[in-house]
Image: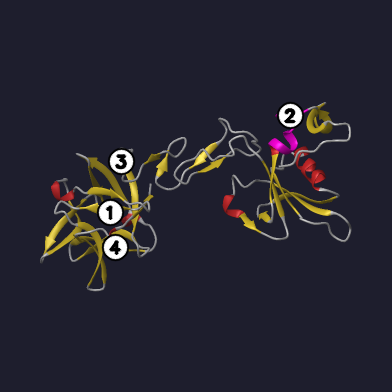
């Protein structure tokens, strides 16, 4: 953090003077105004660079001049700045149109840059379950204009509600289920039977299943309108999109896993699993214990 004190003993502060953001040696202490420019507004992340469009590129004598330029611009939300002066005795200063809160994936380590960001009052991310706090453009405080962008599978003001395969969630909801092999569960019509296989690299209509709940058990409906069900053929318990009306064979128990995946258990007590059968990624009620072949990653597919 940056807090500066002038030779008159006053702390440098951002002052609204005649509708201008004047920077003056005016405060006796570093309160929310006296520390506004440094203690409250900007934090410094050494040797990092935010790769977003800039609204200005200038050279300055010192870092405070650069930060002051950002404060004077309603378009500037953060700054990239050189860590040391060039041959001309100046620092380059890149005024940015966004900040790390909106673009966390674009903040990268970079030895030739320091990153300065407006420090928001909700610095601790209020969003749960991997959600990202995203204020509206220009916001420097948390408030009604800010929102949580939730990760797939969650909703709510703070992303606190699990809506995929949570038996306390919202119904119905469209979900896609990805296996450990990176493929999605999908319906495959073959020889008059709608098999469920873990075979699609990309989501399409056959990878979307509508999740509903009955008596604390999960039911999944495929794109053909049929419920997924355990069907025994030749001593194999296949999972097929086969039932027009749900019954015991189409109800599955959800087991949440520590890594965020889920495993499903059929009415015969077996866990649903990826099985390599005749070079096909068959999905069957086959395992006595949960292993990597049973784990499913949940994604919303509306």
Question: Residues in magenta?
Answer: 29-40
Q: Nearer the viewer, mark 2 or mark 1?
A: 2
Q: Nearer the viewer, mark 2 or mark 3?
A: 2
Label 4 CA crowd tier, 10 Å (few <14, some 14–19, many 20+): some
Asked if residue 36 is among those painted magenta in the image, a careful observer would answer yes
Asked if residue 289 is among those painted magenta in the image, a careful observer would answer no
Q: Which is nearer the N-term, disc 2 or disc 1?
A: 2
Q: Secondary structure at mark 1?
A: strand
Looking at the image, the residue that sits furthest to the left is 234
Q: Residue 210, position in %: x, y?
A: 29, 47
Q: Are marks 1 and 3 in contact (CB under 8 Å)?
A: no
Q: Which numbered dot is residue 33?
A: 2
Instruction: Look at 45% across and 47% down and name the residue there.
Output: 151
Model colouring:
secondary structure
Looking at the image, the residue that sits furthest to the bottom is 279
The residue singled out by tag 1 in the image is 263
Mark 2–mark 1 Cα distance, whole angstroms, equals 53 Å
Q: Which is nearer the N-term, disc 1 or disc 4?
A: 1
Label 2 CA crowd tier, 10 Å (few <14, some 14–19, many 20+): some
Q: Residue 125, position in %: x, y?
A: 54, 40
Quarter of the figure with residue 69: top right
Q: Which numbered dot is residue 293?
A: 4
Mark 1–mark 3 Cα distance, whole angstroms, equals 20 Å
Instruction: Look at 47% across and 43% down and name the residue there.
Output: 150
Q: Which is nearer the N-term, disc 4 or disc 2?
A: 2
């Amino acid at each position: 953090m940056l807090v500066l004190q002038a030779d008159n003993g006053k702390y440098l502060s951002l002052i609204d003077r005649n509708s201008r953001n004047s920077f003056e040696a005016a405060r006796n202490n570093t309160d929310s105004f006296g520390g506004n420019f440094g203690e409250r507004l900007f934090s410094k992340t050494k040797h990092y660079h935010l790769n977003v469009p800039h609204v200005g590129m200038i050279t300055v004598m010192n870092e405070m001049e650069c930060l002051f330029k950002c404060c004077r611009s309603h378009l500037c939300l953060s700054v990239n700045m050189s860590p040391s002066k060039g041959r001309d005795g100046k620092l380059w200063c890149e005024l940015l149109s966004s900040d790390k809160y909106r673009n966390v994936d674009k903040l990268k380590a970079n030895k030739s840059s320091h990153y300065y960001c407006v420090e928001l009052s909700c610095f601790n991310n209020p969003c749960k379950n991997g959600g990202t706090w995203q204020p509206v453009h220009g916001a420097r405080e948390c408030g009604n204009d800010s929102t949580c962008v939730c990760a797939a599978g969650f909703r709510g003001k703070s992303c606190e509600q699990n809506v995929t395969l949570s038996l306390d969630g919202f119904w119905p909801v469209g979900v896609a289920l990805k296996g450990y092999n990176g493929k999605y569960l999908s319906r495959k019509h073959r020889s008059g039977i709608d098999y469920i296989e873990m075979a699609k690299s990309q989501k399409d209509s056959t990878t979307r299943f509508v999740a509903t709940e009955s008596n604390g058990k999960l039911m999944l409906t495929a794109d053909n309108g049929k419920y997924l069900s355990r069907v025994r053929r030749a001593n194999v318990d296949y999972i097929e999109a086969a039932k027009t009306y749900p019954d015991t064979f189409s109800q599955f128990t959800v087991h949440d896993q520590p890594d965020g995946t889920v495993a499903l258990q059929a009415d015969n007590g077996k866990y649903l699993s990826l099985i390599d059968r005749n070079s096909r990624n068959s999905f069957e009620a086959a395992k006595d214990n949960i292993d990597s072949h049973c784990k499913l990653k949940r994604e919303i597919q509306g």
